[in-house]
Image: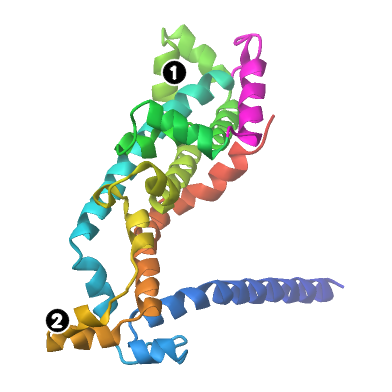
Amino acid sequence: MVRNKSFTNRLINFSLISILILICCLCLIPVLNAIALSFSGRAAANAGRVYLLPIDFNLTSYRKIIEDNGFMDAFLISVKRVLLGCSVQFVLTTMMAYPLSKDAKHFPSRNIYMWYMIFFMLFSGGLIPLYILVTSLGLGNSIWSLILPGAVPIFSVILLMNFFRSLPKEMDEAAMMDGAGPWNTLLFIYVPLSLPAVATVTLFSIVGHWNAFFDGLIYMSRPELYPLQTYIQQLVFKIDMESLSKMSTEQVKEYMQTSDRTLNSAKLIVAMLPILIIYPFLQRYFVKGIVLGSVKE
C-alpha cells in the first residue's frame, strides 16, 4: 500500500514537472523565434524560413536601431522615467497604505477612503478627461505627464496595505512605548519588514513604466521627447527608390539585409532586455509578496 502510494506520488510529480517544462517551452519558443529573426537576413525572414536559429546571420537590425541619434535619448528618458516614477510611486503608495492598514478605531475614515479607492479602481474617468486634465495642468511634453497620472496604483496600495496588516500589532505598541512616532514606525519598522511586498510593487512599477508607450504617444508632441517604448513603436523601416539611389554600396547591402520583420524582432529584444536583467534580483521576493499581500485577516 505504501509502495503504491509512493509510486503514485512520483508519477504525479513527474507529470506536473513535464507539464511545467512544456509550458516553459511554449513560452520560450516565441522569444527564441524573435531572437533568431532579429539576427537573420531579409530574404530568409520574409520567406518565413527562420524558426529557432538565425539564417544569414547579421547585426544590421540592431545597428539600425542603435545608430539612430534618437535612440540613446529615448533610452535615457525611459531610465529617468523608471527612476522618478518608481521613487514617487513608492513614497505615495507607502504613505497611503500605512494609515489604511490601521483599524477603523484608530483611523475612523478608513472605510470611506477604501470604498473611494475601490470605486475608482473599477471605474476610471476615461482617457479623454485624463488627457484634458494633464494638458490643462501644463504637464504636456514633460516627464511628469508620464509619472503623475499613475503615481498611486490602487492595486499596489491594497497589496502593501494587506502586508502591513499581517505584521504583529504589538510592534506598534512597543514603538510607541519607546517614543517612536508614526513616521519612525513606518520608516524603521514597517518598511524594512515588508521587503517582499515592497519588491513586488517595485517590480510592478518598473515593468509598468518601462513597457508603457501609449502615454508618451499622446502627451508628447515632439519625437525627441518620446520614451524608449514609444520611440521603438514608431520605428518603421521604409525607404523609397530616390533614397536608395543615393546610398553607398555598403548602405544598399545593409538595406537588402533588413526588413520590417527583422527590425521589429530587434525592437522586441531591445525592449525585453532591461526587464530580464532586473527581474532575477526581485524574483525571490515576488511570490511571497503576492501571497502575503493578498491575504486579508
Question: What is the spatial separation of the Cα atoms under label 2 and label 1, in whole angstroms?
Answer: 68 Å
Q: Which residue is mark 2?
A: 246
Tell me if I can see residue 290 in this picture: yes
Magenta segment:
102-125
Q: Residue at x 75, y 70 (%)?
A: 9
Where residue 72 appears, as percent x and y from the top left, is 21, 57
Q: Dividing the image into 4 quarters, which one contains the C terminus?
A: top right
Residue density around tag 1, few if under 14, some if 14–19, many if 20 or more, within 10 Å? some
Q: Position of residue 131 (x, y in %)?
A: 46, 36
Q: Which residue is mark 1?
A: 185
Looking at the rendered structure, the kind of residue marked 2 is Lys
| Residue at screen point 20% across, 78% down | 243
Residue at the extreme right = 1
The residue depicted at 40 percent of the width and 67 percent of the height is 268
Front residue of 286/37: it is: 37
Q: Is residue 172 above or below residue 69?
A: above
Question: Does 292 appear above or below 228?
Answer: above
Instruction: State the SS at label 2.
Output: loop
Among the two numbered marks 2 and 1 on one chain, the one whose residue lies closer to the N terminus: 1
Tell me if 248 is positioned left or right of 285 in this view.
left
**Residue 110 sits inside the magenta stretch:** yes
| Nearer-the-camera pick, 10 or 131 | 131
The quadrant of the picture occupied by the N terminus is bottom right
**Residue 136 lies in the magenta stretch:** no
For label 2, count other residues whose C-alpha is less than 10 Å away and answer few (under 14), some (14-19) or many (20+): few
Query: Is 23 situated left or right of 217 in this image?
Result: right
- The residue lying at 41 percent from left, 7 percent from top is 179
